[in-house]
Amino acid sequence: MSISLRVNLGGLEMKNPVTVASGTFAYGEEYDQYFDISQLGAVTVKSLSLRPRAGNPPPRLVETPAGMLNAIGLQNVGIEAYLKDKLPFLRKKGCTIIGNIYGHSPEEYAQLAQRLEAEGGADAIEANLSCPNVHDARTARGCSLVAQNPELVRQYTVAIKTATRLPVFVKLSPNVVDIVESAVAAQEGGADAVSLINTLLGMGINPETRRPILSNIVGGLSGPAIRPVAVKMVWDVAKHLKIPILGMGGICTASDAMQFILAGARAVAVGSYVFREPTAPMKIVQGLDDYCRRHGVADINQLVGAMAV
Amino acid sequence: MPHLADCRIMSNQEIAPEHYRLTLHAPQIAAESAAGQFCMIEVRPGYAPFLRRPMSFERIFNDGFSILYRVQGEGTRLMAMMSSGQVLNIQGPLGKPFPLNPTYQRHILVAGGIGIAPFPALGDAIVRTLGKTPEIVIAARTERLLLCEKDFRQMGCRVHFVTDDGSAGEKGLASDGLLRLNPGPDCVVYACGPMPMLKAVHAVCAARGAVCYASLEAEMACGDGVCLGCVVESNVEVEYERMVRVCKDGPIFDTRIIRWDAY
Ligand SMILES: Cc1cc2nc3c(=O)[nH]c(=O)nc-3n(C[C@H](O)[C@H](O)[C@H](O)COP(=O)(O)OP(=O)(O)OC[C@H]3O[C@@H](n4cnc5c(N)ncnc54)[C@H](O)[C@@H]3O)c2cc1C
Ligand SMILES: Cc1cc2nc3c(=O)[nH]c(=O)nc-3n(C[C@H](O)[C@H](O)[C@H](O)COP(=O)(O)O)c2cc1C
Ligand code: FES
């Protein structure tokens, strides 16, 4: 039986539904040492900003039960160094690229998207409107992320869509009362897909020193610990959206990935688990093929949102 | 290039209270590894613990390598319960090795506690590739935790002991032991241990005009330069190059580039 894993994610053709989560794969080179990364449906790069960013001071990460907390603070080489030093490798490999961007205003996002399109730096844009690690936790209160304010989500999405013809995915935060509201706002703004979820806000304290574990105090929780939350959010959003969903949050195996697909995700991203098992994304591609075979399904698209209720 | 390999445990022995030596059969990894590099160990299947644990190579053999570890928390506690014949998934070699330079007259190693771990391999390399005999300061809380004396005596090294409680050797800190050896510009000092110790050793070396390479520690997720979680602050002027990754840019650093006032 021949199985088709091809999916179309809001205009982005992917040879299989598996990509990686921004910030957990850098720009691909390191993990190409462990498997041929061009076999992935797409490679999603670390958030790019207009200028390079140093990120937060250390310590930046700590392990948690079945996951980790991080407060990297979007350290990245900046878009120009990406185009010059990182992109040629990904293009030479023949990767499909999702260019994740981060800016301080709608104009900056628009500029980043424009620049990526003009230089062939990405095949789709993923706008990170939901990074929890770029605010001063000592003073931040309430809605400090763009993704927490549906009206802003709409405005930012419109600005990016106006700037580029590439498919635009809007990456949403789980740190909201109702993620469907943010997703609907992205759809109204013209988004071609939504990516969910970014990390859940969390923190840890060392009782012996009475000091926060992370220098930024607050960080983002990721890994299998958050998977049930992510699956539920994908399912909620899928019921109310016409545009497709890129699902992520704690995916480690093909069977985890299938939960997201059955809940309504058109494609999935493997995040923190690659740190533990660098070949996991490739194993998940193979595992999805096996799943389809075992279940006698010729086209994976038939399984999107196919949870039996 | 790092490998991912299932490696059989050859032995796992307690060598001091809460301190173990684990030897693994890993010919492919061993063939490409050098002193100062490390591996990431998958402690067991499942998500507890979630991340791999970084461990330096203690000694590198033709058919594998050994590590020396202290029981610190859950991961190392689980490791301590393992026995020969069991299999661990290992990622490695990772990081940069200790630089070896024949122009220095004296090679001084300074170890604090479990910081001794990468030094048997370094001692071997200095003897074998430079034909020199290193000197070593072994510092620990107390006598029973002074490790690897025999290994260094066999290399013909001068061994200096320092303990916090004075139960063996000189009473004091690792940096006091180093001072006693009177380091100067003809010396290269290699240090491994807790951050405050490395800071003190750096201060001694800076004052005496000796070059110092330290093996640093940080919590790691990927071990291979991807997550940017393991950084330390350096003195580099360029703002976005200031954070250096312990796993990929290190773990061995020339101590002059580290911003010690942050520690
Ligand atoms: C490059 C490198 C080489 C290392 N080599 C050795 C070695 O040869 N022998 C050895 O005994 N240890 C070594 N370590 C430290 C070792 O990795 C940690 O002790 C171990 O990960 C603790 O795991 P755990 O599950 O037992 O403890 P956990 O329960 O995870 O943690 C217990 C405590 O240890 C601290 N800790 C956790 N991970 C690290 C870490 N990676 N570095 C420093 N502190 C940590 C935590 O903050 C916590 O306070 C090395 C670390 C690095 C970065
Ligand atoms: C170390 C680390 C760095 C991350 N950096 C980014 C980033 O730069 N941009 C972004 O949109 N998301 C970033 N994320 C969030 C992930 O892309 C993903 O949304 C989240 O981790 C949930 O997936 P997971 O549980 O599989 O890791 C980062 C996550 C981690 C763990
Ligand atoms: S541990 Fe991930 S970059 Fe060093």
Image (cartoon, rainbow, N blue to C red):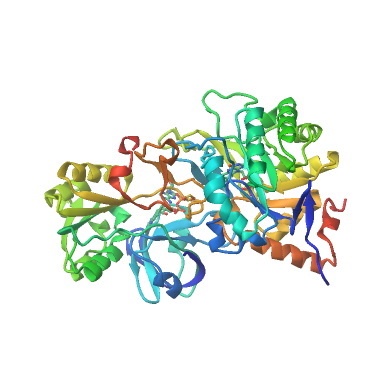
Q: How many marks?
A: 0
Q: Image check: A24 left or right of A291?
A: left
Horizontal side, residue A214 vs residue A305: left or right: left
Between A181 and A22, the residue placed more toward the observer is: A22
Position of residue B54 relative to residue B230, above or below, is: below
Q: Quadrant of the C terminus of chain B?
A: top left
Name which residue lies at 38% across and 49% down: B217
Q: In this rendering, is residue A216 above or below A257?
A: above
Q: Foreground: B129 or A59?
A: B129
Report x, y in % for residue A272: 59, 50
Q: Position of residue B190 (x, y in %)?
A: 25, 54
Viewer can see residue B12: no
Say which residue appears at 80% left-offset and 41% top-offset: A236
Q: Position of residue B21 (x, y in %)?
A: 36, 66
Can residue A261 be seen here?
yes
- Which sits in the foreground, B157 or A135? A135
Above or below, A246 relative to A136: below
Q: Is residue B57 left or right of residue A264?
A: left
Task: State the residue lying farthest toward the right.
Answer: A309
Q: Residue furthest front?
A: A118
Q: Position of residue A125 (x, y in %)?
A: 69, 42
